[in-house]
Image (cartoon, grey):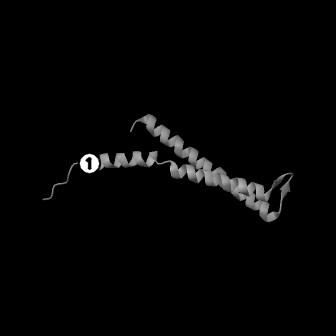
Amino acid sequence: MTDKALNKRLRSKVAMHMLFGLGGAVVIIGALFKILHLEIGPITGGLVLGLGLGTEALIFTVAALNTGEIKEEHADYVKKVKGAPKKSRT
């Protein structure tokens, strides 16, 4: 695997990690608004909670459909297994 491919994979993982964190934070803030019955103008707990849960649903959908990385890792694994020298039994 080339350095360019590894950098792309790392950026993808970092971006997904950040999206999961931000989506979770919005859900927690929405739950807090809902529990405490907070309202800031038109922003209510239900709205923030709905936005957070919708964001999380989209993130999980993207993560579920992102199978390219899994296929690459499987291909690398197959290359290692097939390319590894066989151990002789003595």
Q: Is residue 34 visible?
A: yes
Query: Horizontal and vertical percent for residue 32?
Result: 76, 61
Residue at 81 percent of width and 64 percent of height: 36
Q: Is residue 32 above or below residue 65?
A: below
Q: Is residue 20 visible?
A: no
- Image quarter (top left, top right, bottom left or bottom right) of the C terminus: bottom left
Number of other residues with Cα within 10 Å of mark 1, as a class: few under 14, some 14 to 19, many 20 or more: few
Count the numbered circles shown: 1
Q: Amino acid at mark 1?
A: Lys
State the residue lying farthest toward the top. 4
Q: Which residue is mark 1?
A: 82
Query: Horizontal and vertical percent for residue 47?
Result: 77, 55
Residue at 44 percent of width and 37 percent of height: 5
State the residue lying farthest toward the left. 90
* In this picture, residue 62 sits left or right of residue 44: left
Query: Horizontal and vertical percent for residue 1?
Result: 38, 39
Choose between 26 and 90: the one closer to the eye: 26
Query: Horizontal and vertical percent for residue 14?
Result: 55, 45
* In this picture, residue 3 sits left or right of residue 53: left
Which secondary structure lies at badge 1?
Answer: helix
Choose between 62 and 21: the one closer to the eye: 62
